[in-house]
Image: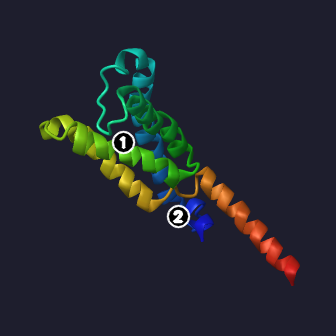
């Protein structure tokens, strides 16, 4: 069911969940810093920012800021985790394969590292220490209560 995908309740061990939380915090803050830098320089960057999608530099910059700043915050706390990760992964795909396509690997290496980590984290899920896990547990409780009331 879609709830299980968005709000996972499968039990992870505490150690694994702590590791996932640490990765979310570290990589979320690192990517968020890129978004903050772009946001604080929006006026200057909006005329020169790459436009790989053909939608205009200001909109491309806005989407990059959304993926790097807003989605990173959701990633860190584990809220709508997998939905938030889609723009993050897309931003890194565009950065690695389009914007830096002709650059040497050393230039695009950071985008590649983020991409690999985010794909692995997408597959793994947020762990027990996330808002999605809390929501998933509450939905399960409500579903269980509703089922008991039907009997």
Query: Does the rendering let one see residue 122?
Result: yes
33 sits left or right of 92 in the view = right
Q: Which residue is most to the bottom? A: 151
Q: Residues within 10 Å of mark 1 (few under 14, many from 20)?
A: many
> Secondary structure beneath disc 1?
helix
Q: Is residue 43 left or right of residue 109?
A: right
Secondary structure at numbered mark 2: loop
Asked which quadrant contains residue 94, the reply is top left
- Can residue 23 be seen from the camera position used here? no
Q: Which residue matches tag 1?
A: 91
Residue 105 locus on image (x, y percent):
14, 40
Q: Quadrant of the C terminus?
A: bottom right
x, y (%) of residue 107? Answer: 18, 34
Residue sitting at x 31%, y 32%: 51
- Is mark 2 in CB contact (under 8 Å) with mark 1? no
* Residue at 40%, 24% in the rendered image: 38
What residue is drawn where x is 40% and y is 17%?
A: 41
Expressed as whole percent of the image width and height from the top left, the position of residue 118 reads: 38, 50
Q: As displayed, is residue 39 above or below residue 92?
A: above
Q: Residue furthest top?
A: 44
Which is more foreground, mark 2 or mark 1? 1
Q: CA distance from mark 2 to mark 1?
A: 31 Å
- Residue under the image location 31 percent in, 25 percent down: 49
Q: Earlier in the sequence, mark 2 or mark 1?
A: 2
Placement of the N terminus among the 4 image quadrants: bottom right
The residue beneath circle 2 is 13
Q: Nearer the viewer, residue 124 or 65?
A: 65
Circle number at residue 81: none
Above-or-below relation of 65 to 116? above
Please tell me in which quadrant of the rendered image residue 143 appears: bottom right
Task: From the viewer's side, name the closer residue of 45 and 32.
Answer: 45
């Amino acid at each position: 069911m879609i709830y299980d995908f968005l709000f996972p309740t499968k039990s992870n061990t505490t150690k694994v969940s702590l590791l996932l939380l640490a990765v979310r915090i570290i990589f979320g803050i690192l990517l968020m810093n890129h978004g903050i830098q772009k946001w604080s320089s929006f006026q200057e960057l909006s005329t020169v920012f790459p436009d790989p999608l053909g939608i205009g530099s200001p909109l491309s910059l806005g989407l990059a800021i959304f993926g790097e700043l807003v989605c990173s915050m959701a990633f860190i706390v584990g809220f709508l985790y997998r939905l938030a990760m889609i723009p993050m992964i897309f931003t890194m795909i565009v950065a690695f394969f389009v914007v830096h396509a002709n650059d040497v690997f050393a230039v695009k290496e950071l985008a590649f590292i983020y991409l690999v980590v985010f794909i692995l984290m997408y597959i793994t899920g947020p762990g027990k220490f996330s808002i999605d896990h809390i929501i998933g547990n509450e939905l399960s409780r409500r579903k269980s209560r509703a089922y008991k009331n039907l009997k």
